[in-house]
């Protein structure tokens, strides 16, 4: 640590003494957001530059601005007859050219001149069909905010109405819904859970397999989704990858507590229409140290992941894009107890998980007003687990094992057609065909035999279609009605889902938003395939369960204050129906509360649920080196099983609040050459609802026995967390260094968030929030 500090002080001093001004190139392309046609003669200007730095786009919509001073910049893009767009707080370093893709929307009111300014909406979303309950996931903010660890899922937990698992997983809990209701998408295609150490049916994990160095700005949806989004009822993480540099090769190396990774990008081919590549590989730092025998302890998490994107222009045949993502993780653990005065291993287990996806996309203009997107993809994901206990004779006996594997084949086609500036149509078809091979068995001590509760191979299909219409009768009002259709072939269930979104500018700086949507999602395949043994007969009691339905209603008001401030208040109501609950009223559990388990007990679609609340957001965008974000939520999350009694869901924490802020300082005379940044976050969440444990029954059965008569009636501790980060960015000629320390839970708060019965000690023990976790990262760009 001392040598690293000396190295960076030397870099700071040498940069301060170095008189040469650091400059870099900004390049990109400007196109129509609906038709993808290049806009010729668009104006691109670096706001605040003196003399003014800017450029106009050529016949392909491309532009180049050279010799731009490094540091934070705001980029304004305008074109006659189109709405201006401002891209704020872009970070320009000396090591990498800044390559941007800009999509402008045609103005409903035809303008006779263009005025350059920073008055446009800085909270604009990537998908123009979104009007409410959505937020941009900025790559720059993800790397800057304290405690995010460059993870888009952890970044989402900063938004109003969104919580994460206090014990460390980046599960995304939106408005009191189960994390199971989240849909992950990459480049417009649904993908498996992209997290390491992820179980089947879950949507989170400790570490995201997708490195933020690969990401472009993306959208995160929390309710009343646009018609094109399906197979989700609580939220959508719509992620996109950036394209590589098509003019020069660039590299980035990063080493930290969580991993060591390398990113490379550059052009493919020669001539006017070059392709690009972007690739990243990461390997667990702890695994490296373990392989070198530097550390040695039980439960070392080992993981690695890789991702890439290749863009291949094909002239009149359009453009092909190949995207890949894969990750593998494993952990072996054991438990030690003192037997007869000797520390002895009494329990051990092994867990491994993997995921991968390969996407081939094609985009082509069918006319000046019509664009077709199509893709085919395949993905795999699965896990394997076993556990063993030490017997009385000292030998280890396996008592549980499972192996779960899924392969998905997907095809989709989406067509965009712009009738005119006021009317845009979008429609599409998706089909997913899943192949599964799943086994699970456990040792039944009473029967003294292995019992299979999962043993099935087969396939399941999910067909979806949608149509949407964006209507803008004037420059102040956007209305997006549409329909989504879902058909789950395994159970035969289908659903027609109306959607409606609206955004209305009622004053110069005031917006009203609203939306309604009906949404569905099948349960985990494990629940549909789970087996029940009745005498000599094996059945699958839940194979014909219908999909859960959720009706979302949202209304909000947004106030823009000047160029750098925004206040938003949004209220929502969600009614959930056809919720799978246990057929036996004596078991009051519900699928609403499940996200990492399954059951072979018979369930029926007779449960309901409701979530309602009010959310508040106040934000100052990064300006003059300072930013701030404050969010707060008050809400209720309830469910009703077959017995008709309404209860709390586990995630009915009632209140959540976040306060984030940060400041950057220039440490050298040359703008942007040496920057010091400090960021902080304070987060509060009410206690998670938990079920009491019956201690005597647990001791008799040797496992946790829950008091189901008082399901979720107890509440864990309120959770407080303080995060902090400090970074130093040093730009030199064609090289950029960054050293960052990012600490979660700096006060080491240890709120009790769950309880379980420990059969070794015979006591009820507590699971606490994740303790203080520091992450130190050094990044070199060249």
Image: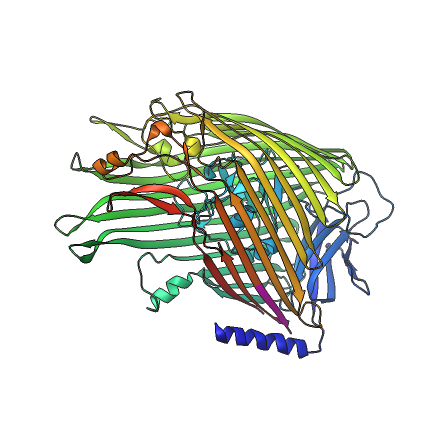
Relative depth, front residue between 737 and 689: 689
Q: Main secondary structure of the magenta part?
A: strand
Relative depth, front residue between 425 and 400: 400
Residue 543 lies, with reference to residue 353, above or below; the image says above
Residue pictured at 57% horizontal, 38% vertical = 633
Residue 481 falls inside the magenta stretch: no
Q: Is residue 345 among what the camera can see?
A: yes
Residue 489 lies, with reference to residue 399, above or below; the image says above
Q: Which residues are magenta?
A: 727-735
43 left or right of 685 in image:
right
Can you give x and y, in whole percent of width and height, for residue 673 in the image?
A: 66, 70
Name the residue at the right extreme. 112
Q: Quadrant of residue 49?
A: bottom right
Can you give x and y, in whole percent of width and height, for residue 580 in the image?
A: 41, 27
Q: Quadrant of residue 53?
A: bottom right
Can you give x and y, in whole percent of width and height, for residue 771 in the image?
A: 43, 54
Q: Quadrant of residue 71?
A: bottom right
Residue pictured at 55% horizontal, 33% vertical = 635
Residue pictured at 82% horizontal, 65% vertical = 51
Relative depth, front residue between 81 and 709: 709
Can you give x and y, in whole percent of width and height, for residue 749 in the image?
A: 45, 51
Name the residue at the left extreme. 393
Q: Quadrant of the C terminus?
A: bottom right
Residue pictured at 38% horizontal, 29% vertical = 589
């Amino acid at each position: 640590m001392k040598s690293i500090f000396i190295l960076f002080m030397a870099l700071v001093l040498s940069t301060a003494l170095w008189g040469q001004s650091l400059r870099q190139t900004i390049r990109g392309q400007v196109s129509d957001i609906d038709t993808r046609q290049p806009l010729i003669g668009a104006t691109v200007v670096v706001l605040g530059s003196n003399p003014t730095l800017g450029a106009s786009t050529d016949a392909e919509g491309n532009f180049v601005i050279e010799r731009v001073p490094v540091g934070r910049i705001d980029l304004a893009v305008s074109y006659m007859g189109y709405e201006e767009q401002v891209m704020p707080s872009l970070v320009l370093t000396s090591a990498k050219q800044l390559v941007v893709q800009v999509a402008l929307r045609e103005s409903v009111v035809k303008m006779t001149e263009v005025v350059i300014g920073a008055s446009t909406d800085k909270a604009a979303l990537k998908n123009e069909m979104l009007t409410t309950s959505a937020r941009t996931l900025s790559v720059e903010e993800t790397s800057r905010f304290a405690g995010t660890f460059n993870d888009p899922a952890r970044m989402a937990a900063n938004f109003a109405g969104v919580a994460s698992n206090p014990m460390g997983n980046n599960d995304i809990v939106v408005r009191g819904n189960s994390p199971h209701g989240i849909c992950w998408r990459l480049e417009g295609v649904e993908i498996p859970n992209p997290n390491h150490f992820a179980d089947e049916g879950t949507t989170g994990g400790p570490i995201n397999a997708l490195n933020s160095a690969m990401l472009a700005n993306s959208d995160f949806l929390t309710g009343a989704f646009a018609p094109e989004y399906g197979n989700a009822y609580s939220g959508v993480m719509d992620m996109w990858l950036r394209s590589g540099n098509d003019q020069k090769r660039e590299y980035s190396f990063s080493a930290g507590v969580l991993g060591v990774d390398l990113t490379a990008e550059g052009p493919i081919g020669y001539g006017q229409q070059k392709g690009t590549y972007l690739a990243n590989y990461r390997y667990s730092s702890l695994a490296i140290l373990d392989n070198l025998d530097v550390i040695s302890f039980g439960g070392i998490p080992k993981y690695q992941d890789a991702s890439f994107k290749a863009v291949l222009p094909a002239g009149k045949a359009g453009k092909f894009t190949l995207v890949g993502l894969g990750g593998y993780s494993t952990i072996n653990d054991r438990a030690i107890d003192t037997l007869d005065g000797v520390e002895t291993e009494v329990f051990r287990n092994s867990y491994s998980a993997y995921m991968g996806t390969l996407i081939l996309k094609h985009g082509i203009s069918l006319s000046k007003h019509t664009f077709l997107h199509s893709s085919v993809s395949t993905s795999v994901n699965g896990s394997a687990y076993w556990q063993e206990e030490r017997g009385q004779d000292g030998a280890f006996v396996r008592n549980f094992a499972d192996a779960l594997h899924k392969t998905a084949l997907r095809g989709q086609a989406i067509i965009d057609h712009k009738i005119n500036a006021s009317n845009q149509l979008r429609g599409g078809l998706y089909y997913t065909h899943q192949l599964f091979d799943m086994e699970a068995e456990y040792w039944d001590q009473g029967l003294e035999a292995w019992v299979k509760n999962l043993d099935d191979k087969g396939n399941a299909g999910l067909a979806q279609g949608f149509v949407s219409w964006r209507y803008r009768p004037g420059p102040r009002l956007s209305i997006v009605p549409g329909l989504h259709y879902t058909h789950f072939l395994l159970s035969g269930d289908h659903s027609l889902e109306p959607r409606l979104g609206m955004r209305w500018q009622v004053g110069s700086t005031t917006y009203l938003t609203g939306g309604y949507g009906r949404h569905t999602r099948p349960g985990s395949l494990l629940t549909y395939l789970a087996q029940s043994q009745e005498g000599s007969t094996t059945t699958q009691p839940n194979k014909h369960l219908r999909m859960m339905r959720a009706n979302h209603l949202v209304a909000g008001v947004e106030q823009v204050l000047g160029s750098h401030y925004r206040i938003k208040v949004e209220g929502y109501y969600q009614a959930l129906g056809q919720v799978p609950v246990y057929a036996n009223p004596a078991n009051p559990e519900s699928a609403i509360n499940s996200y990492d388990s399954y059951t072979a007990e018979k369930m029926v679609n007779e449960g309901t649920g409701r979530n309602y609340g009010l959310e508040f957001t106040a934000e100052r965008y990064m300006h003059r080196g300072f930013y701030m974000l404050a969010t707060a939520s008050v809400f209720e999350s309830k469910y009703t099983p077959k017995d008709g009694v309404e209860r709390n869901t586990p995630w009915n924490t009632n209140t959540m609040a976040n306060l984030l802020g940060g400041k950057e300082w220039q440490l050298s005379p040359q703008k942007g050459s040496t920057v010091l940044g400090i960021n902080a976050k304070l987060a509060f969440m009410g206690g998670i609802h938990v079920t009491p444990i019956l201690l005597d029954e647990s001791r008799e059965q040797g496992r946790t026995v829950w008091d189901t008569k008082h399901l979720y009636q107890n509440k864990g501790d309120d959770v407080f967390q303080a995060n902090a980060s400090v970074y130093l960015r040093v730009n030199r000629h064609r090289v950029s260094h960054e050293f960052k320390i990012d600490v979660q839970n700096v006060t080491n708060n240890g709120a009790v968030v769950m309880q379980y019965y420990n059969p070794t000690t015979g006591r009820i023990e507590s699971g606490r929030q994740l303790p203080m976790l520091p992450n130190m990262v050094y990044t070199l760009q060249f």
